[in-house]
Image: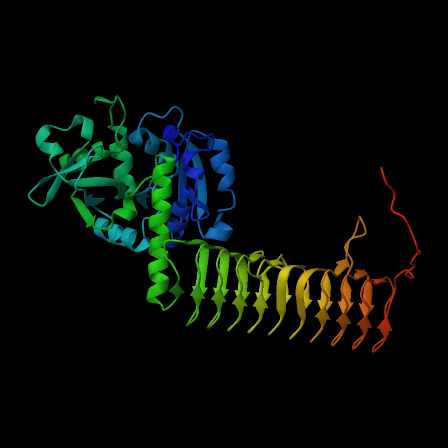
Amino acid sequence: MAAGKGTRMKSKLPKVLHLLAGRALLQHVVDTAAELSARRVVVITGHGATEVEAALSGSTKATAGFDIDFVRQEPQLGTGHAVQQAVPALPDDGMVVVLSGDVPLTRADTLHALIAACGGNKLALLTIDFADPTGYGRIVRQGEVVQAIVEHKDATEAQRAITEIYSGIMAVPAARLKAWLVRLDNKNAQGEYYLTDIVKFAVADGVPVVAHKIADALQVEGVNSPVQLAALERAYQKRIALQLMEQGVRLADPARFDVRGSLQCAQDVSIDVNCVFEGQVVLGEGVRIGANCVISNVTIGAGAVIHPFTHIEGDKPGSKGHIEVGAGALIGPFARLRPGAKLGDEVHIGNFVEVKNSTLAKGAKANHLAYLGDAVVGERVNYGAGSITANYDGAFKHRTVIEADVHIGSNCVLVAPVTIGAGGTVGGGSTITKDTPAGALSVARGKQVSIANWTRPKK
């Protein structure tokens, strides 16, 4: 269900598209459905329907393993009315799991347990005990048997004292659900069609109603305001931090750590404060990440050190733009690796050096204030401060090749396409426009002229 307006978010963006850990709230829910091996996902949209549907357009059967359908709830007349819109898309032989687009952190194993409780012939509800259940529907039991869910506004004082609440998540046979949805009415305090009313229909029809109770409140927490979103973000990040530390990762401060994708760490990885990991990041054994780094879509080899304030911005694994950093490499501080950077073992990229779509072989060094774009750099190259590859002619990109053991002096411009021969040296301040021979010293700069007794102009 993803039709709500989310007024309390105070935003033009539909609530379910607000980000948690780098993904839309609704995307978290759809990704969980994929873990259930769902054959179909039906997204009920309403407010901002066009934006919501466009945002999920990539979640197709080809990429996610299921068909995705969109149905619209206009106007929004309650949860029961929302699910009624999905009826044409629900096959009679299926089991329906009802999820909320603003409840992003329900675990797949919890839903598997709920489905098992349903067993294909029962109505199964996910429940939890809250010390303060205000605003939630109460689970009314007779003994251990669930008899009804009573919404807070319709509950008696005795019912409001019940602490077991309905999370908004259920599993139910599709054929049964369709029959019960037809019987809904809006005779209640809010004048809405409550999905929870199907419980009394199940009881009346002799269908067992079971509750699967959990203790982890994070799995059923919804988002209604920026404050709640921020709290859920920190709770999620704490969960990830604890998992990593239990695997042996050393986090300087788990409260100052953000994963907005996936982070895979080998043994003896250490991560300093205020680091953000996006996309898919793989850290090899003994990797050290300094403070205040932003790292996305990269594989970093064993023993590499990423010094503080480094920005690594790769593309997805398997793409040309995915970044690789070799074992024992030293990167930063204040370095920037852009898509397509491929750094071999023991490469050094220093402060204020930018590398894009370039390959640097083992032991190559660019230690400060330099740019390498569309370049192939050989082993043991020393690339001087202030030097750049001029790779763009205004219309096309061109490649620079710097062969092994070359020394590039400071403040050089290598105008691509150009090849610097193995073992060669380029004198500082040179602008190189032609290929240079192996082993040669190449100098290309204007002759120095000094004018004696020159007087600077005065006002």
Q: Residue at x 51, y 42 (%)?
A: 57
Q: Is residue 188 left or right of residue 380?
A: left
Image coordinates for residue 284, horizontal then vertical, percent: 48, 70
Q: Residue at x 29, y 51 (%)?
A: 111
Q: Pick whichever, 227 or 44, lies toward us.
A: 227
Q: Is residue 1 visible?
A: no
In the displayed image of the protein, which residue is found farthest to the left? 143
Quadrant location, the C terminus: top right
Q: Is residue 220 left or right of residue 315?
A: left
Q: Is residue 332 left or right of residue 145?
A: right
Quadrant location, the N terminus: top left
Q: Pick whichever, 458 or 116, lies toward us.
A: 458
Q: Residue at x 65, y 75 (%)?
A: 363
The answer to which quarter of the image holds residue 452 is bottom right
The answer to which quarter of the image holds residue 408 is bottom right
Q: Pick whichever, 194 or 432, lies toward us.
A: 432
Image coordinates for residue 415, horizontal then vertical, percent: 82, 59
Image coordinates for residue 306, horizontal then vertical, percent: 53, 64
Residue 133 vs 29, above or below: the answer is: above
Image coordinates for residue 22, horizontal then vertical, percent: 46, 48
Q: Pick whichever, 427 or 183, lies toward us.
A: 427
Q: Is residue 59 visible?
A: yes
